[in-house]
Amino acid sequence: MPLLTEPTPDAPETPRPPRPWSAKFGDALRGLKKGIRGQSSFFVHFFFAALVIAAAIVLQCGLVEWCVLVLCMGLVLTAELFNSAVEAFFRGLDEPTKEKTWHALDIAAGAVLVASVFAAAVGLAIFLQRLIVILQWTS
């Protein structure tokens, strides 16, 4: 006997109608809005992203450097969105389940921290290299 139940012939499974791309993008944008809204840590990430953009302009970063910086910013913001999703899911749990799963919140926050630290290290390496070139500190 199989562990999973299979649909019986008298109760056929009705497939979901395909959703248009506009609806999918609408859902994604709504999720982005909900993920950003009310998250104080997003303000911090956007503030540092603005500083990175300003520094990249001032230090005249090249295309590859811009790509790496934008990728790092995107990874940090994506990690923060996943953290927000875990927090939203956690809020919907009952108290006994919350007691068993609160470590998930710490792990999600840790993922944001790891992404932020590595992004900061990459940014620091790029900006220090640009400063050295601009100020001609090498012989």
Image: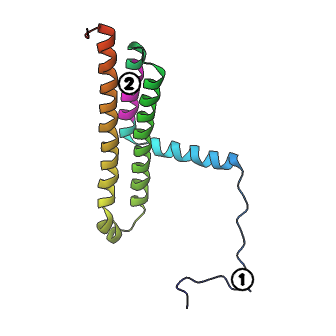
Between disc 1 and disc 2, whose residue precedes? 1
Tell me, yes or no, if residue 35 can be seen here.
yes
Q: What is the secondary structure assignment of the residue under circle 1?
A: loop
Amino acid identity at mark 2: Val
Quarter occupied by residue 118: top left
Neighbour tally class for label 1: few under 14, some 14-19, many 20 plus, Cα within 10 Å? few
Magenta portion: prevailing SS class: helix
Q: Seen in the image, is 91 located left or right of residue 102?
A: right
Q: Is residue 127 magenta?
A: no
Look at 50% across and 46% down and name the residue there. 34
Magenta stretch in the rendered image? 43-54
> x%, y% of residue 96?
32, 71
Determine which residue is flagged by label 2.
52
Q: What is the secondary structure assignment of the residue under circle 2?
A: helix
Checking the image for residue 21, the label placed there is none
Look at 40% across and 28% down and name the residue there. 49
